[in-house]
Every structure is written in structure tokens, then in C-alpha cells.
Image (tube, rainbow, N blue to C red):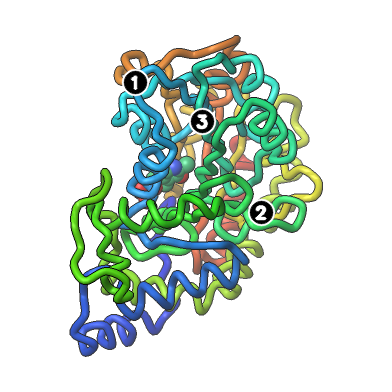
């Protein structure tokens, strides 16, 4: 069976974990945490990175930092992972789901604009499949209305928009290192703080709401409870594993990109069939080969394709069920505007196996059975 995903192992992770054990410092903000944040700040040329236990945790920190709460509205796509919405529902804010663009499956700037009310406080964008949203337009809208912009860049580390790294354009950005993402440590994440005035509070929110970071730097002689917060630190064991992946990130990217391009090139006859589509990469955007998907004609055809691939040892999978139609989504949010694409596109998308180390031969196998299914 060709799995849909395999967690990335580049080699050498064990040595760094051993080093972390020898360092005898396993809690957060240790030597490997510092190496990871320094690497991110350098690579992304950003103000400040905080290693977190997950992207979910980073989104929760972002929600606390924007002070979104009861009576405030937060605009986001319905076509996203639950954590994007959960972080704000936990704060008591109201979620305003809006439609996506047909081609990229990213939030529609036009729909954002139409959903803004005097109570709107935050826009959360999701760079789906590591492909950038229309950030110039979104930042313009946010500035005009005085709104926070958070980039849920969970899938988008190393992707860029007009040469600028994703996660560094909004006021705050978040990354995930879950095992399903390009670069991983099992569970892990990062909060990027691009807006300087939020840095001091972010340090406290990450450290259970205390000023422990200032204490560590010798700035205060004891640390106390100062703000809302939680335990938003990444263990050194995870940071050690992750740092090895950061050091080899270009190798990981090259490998994924080669297989992604192979899918794109070899499935051209299939994506030429009317109503069948592959990923769309807009101009001036570099993606990170996070995901290769096809859009089938409808939900039934997708089920048939997934079944046929399974019979031929290939695991292909759908993706998000739109949040506005989920049980909790109905309770905590409302869809604003018309659902032209969210439900329809979510019903026909199928993701093909793609992970670091998948062989050219395995991709050829997947392609072959997709072609046979479509008689292409
Ligand atoms: C994976 C993902 C998350 C959650 O990441 P975790 O690190 O598992 O918490 C959030 N948002 C998006 C868009 C994701 O793809």
C-alpha cells in the first residue's frame, strides 16, 4: 500500500535528541528551542518566532494577543482545519465564515470585505496547500478597517508571496510541525510575531501568563502572574528533532517539489478533461509542494476514484468538511454571503500521496491508476 503520508525523517534526528538528553534541559526555551527560533528568524527575516506545542497552540496565542472576545467578530474561511476557528471560539468571539476562491481554495478578499461590520476585529487567512492568499488585497482591506491579520500558515513554511515568506506578512503568523506537514517533529508549531508591540505580551502568554522570560534575562528579580496565558512551550526533545529538519530543509523541499512536478506533468491528460482540475499556482507565488490534489467532477466520482485507488494499493484522501456545516461550526459561527465554492469544492477534492522520500516509481504507480480510472 502506498500511504497518503509518512512523517518526514531526514536522518540525524536521533543524534540531536541524544544531545538534548545530554544537555539535561528538556523543558521549553532551551538550547534547541533557541536554535529553531534563530533559524526561523534568519530564514524568514522576521521579527520574532516562538516555538509552540502545535499550530493550534500558536493560534490560541494569536487569539489571546488580539484580545478578540465576546461581541467581537472574526472572519475566516469555512474551508479550513478546526483549529483556525477553535482558537477564537475559545475566547468567546463570533466566527464569520466566508467563501473561498474557486481556483486556489483560499479565502476570497471580496467576501472578506462584504462580511466586515463595526464589530469585526480579526481576519484569519489560511494559505491552503502552501499556496499564498492574495495578501496585498487582504492587507489593504485590513488597514482600511483597522483589523488584525493572522496568517494560518500551518502548511506554508518556505512558501512566498511576491518574494516575501508566508507567515511574515500579517501581524501574526502560525506554522505547524505536525507529522502530516512538510517539516515535522510529530507535534509542534510556531507563532511569528511581526507586529513589534505584541512581542512583550507574547513572551508572557507563552509562559503561562508570567514574566518569566524577563526573569531569565535578569530584568526582574522574581516572576509573577501578569497576563492571560498557558503552557505554550515546545519540549527540547521536539525542538532537537525539528532542528535537524530545518538544517536539511532545502533537501526536503527539492524532493517534494520533484514528486509534485511529476504528478503535475504526468497527469496533464487527466487535468485536460473538462471539469477535472489540478492545483492552481498564481503568478508571483512560490509554493512548497505541500499537497497535490485533483478535483473530480462531483462527490460520487471522488468516492469511486478513492475506492478504485484503494483496490490498487493507493491511499488517496478527501480534505476538510466545511466548518460552517459542522456541529460546532453551527454553534460558534455563521456563514456570511453565498456559498458558491466552499461546499462544492470540498466535495470533489482528493489528495494524492506525497511525502518526503516517496519514490518516482510510487508516484508513477499512482498516476497510472488515476489515468486508467479516467481512461486518459
Ligand atoms: C495542520 C493545520 C493546523 C493544526 O496544526 P497542529 O500543529 O496540528 O495544531 C491548523 N491549521 C491548518 C490550516 C492546518 O493545516
Q: Nearer the viewer, residue 91 or 370?
A: 91
Q: Quadrant of the C terminus?
A: top right
Numbered label attached to residue 287: 2
Q: Would you call the spot at circle 2 few (<14 residues within 10 Å), some (14-19), or many (20 or more)?
A: many
The correct choice, above or below, for 107 with respect to 285 in the image is above
Q: Secondary structure at mark 1?
A: loop
The residue under label 1 is: 70
Q: CA distance from mark 3 to mark 2?
A: 25 Å
**In the rendered structure, which disc, 2 or 1, sits on the residue that comes first in sequence?**
1
Q: Quadrant of the N terminus?
A: bottom left
Numbered label attached to residue 122: 3
Q: Nearer the viewer, residue 205 or 314?
A: 205
Q: CA distance from mark 2 to mark 1?
A: 36 Å
Is residue 300 visible in the rendered image? The answer is: no
Quadrant in the picture for residue 50? bottom left
Q: Position of residue 215 (x, y in %)?
A: 26, 70
Amino acid at each position: 500500500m502506498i500511504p497518503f503520508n509518512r512523517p518526514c525523517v531526514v536522518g540525524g534526528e536521533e543524534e540531536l535528541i541524544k544531545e538534548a538528553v545530554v544537555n539535561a534541559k528538556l523543558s521549553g526555551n532551551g538550547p534547541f528551542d533557541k536554535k529553531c527560533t534563530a533559524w526561523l528568524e534568519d530564514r524568514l527575516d522576521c521579527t520574532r518566532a516562538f516555538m509552540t506545542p502545535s499550530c493550534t497552540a500558536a493560534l490560541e496565542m494569536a487569539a489571546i494577543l488580539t484580545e478578540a472576545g465576546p461581541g467581537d467578530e472574526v472572519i475566516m474561511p469555512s474551508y479550513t482545519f478546526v483549529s483556525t476557528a477553535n482558537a477564537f471560539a475559545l475566547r468567546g468571539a463570533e466566527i464569520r465564515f466566508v467563501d473561498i476562491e474557486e481556483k486556489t481554495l483560499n479565502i476570497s478578499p471580496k467576501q472578506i470585505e462584504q462580511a466586515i461590520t463595526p464589530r469585526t476585529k480579526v481576519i484569519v487567512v489560511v494559505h491552503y496547500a502552501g499556496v499564498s492568499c492574495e495578501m496585498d488585497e487582504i492587507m489593504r482591506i485590513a488597514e482600511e478597517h483597522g483589523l488584525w491579520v493572522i496568517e494560518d500558515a500551518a502548511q506554508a513554511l518556505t512558501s512566498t508571496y511576491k518574494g516575501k515568506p508566508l507567515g511574515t506578512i500579517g501581524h501574526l503568523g502560525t506554522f505547524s510541525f505536525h507529522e502530516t506537514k512538510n517539516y515535522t517533529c510529530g507535534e509542534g508549531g510556531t507563532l511569528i510575531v511581526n507586529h513589534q508591540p505584541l512581542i512583550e505580551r507574547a513572551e508572557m502568554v507563552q509562559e503561562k501568563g508570567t514574566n518569566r522570560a524577563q526573569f531569565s534575562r535578569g530584568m526582574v528579580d522574581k516572576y509573577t502572574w501578569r497576563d492571560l496565558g498557558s503552557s505554550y512551550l515546545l519540549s527540547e526533545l521536539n525542538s532537537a528533532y525539528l532542528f535537524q529538519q530545518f538544517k536539511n530543509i532545502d533537501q526536503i523541499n527539492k524532493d517534494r517539489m520533484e514528486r509534485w512536478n511529476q504528478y503535475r506533468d504526468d497527469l496533464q491528460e487527466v487535468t485536460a478533461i473538462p471539469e477535472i482540475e489540478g492545483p492552481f499556482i498564481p503568478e508571483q507565488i512560490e509554493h512548497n509542494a505541500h499537497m497535490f490534489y485533483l478535483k473530480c467532477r462531483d462527490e460520487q466520482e471522488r468516492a469511486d476514484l478513492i475506492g478504485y485507488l484503494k483496490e490498487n494499493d493507493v491511499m488517496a484522501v478527501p480534505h476538510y468538511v466545511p466548518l460552517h456545516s459542522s456541529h460546532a461550526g453551527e454553534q460558534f459561527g455563521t456563514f456570511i454571503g453565498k456559498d458558491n465554492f466552499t461546499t462544492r469544492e470540498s466535495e470533489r477534492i482528493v489528495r494524492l500521496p506525497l511525502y518526503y522520500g516517496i519514490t518516482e516509481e510510487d508516484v508513477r504507480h499512482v498516476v497510472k491508476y488515476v489515468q486508467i480510472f479516467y481512461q486518459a
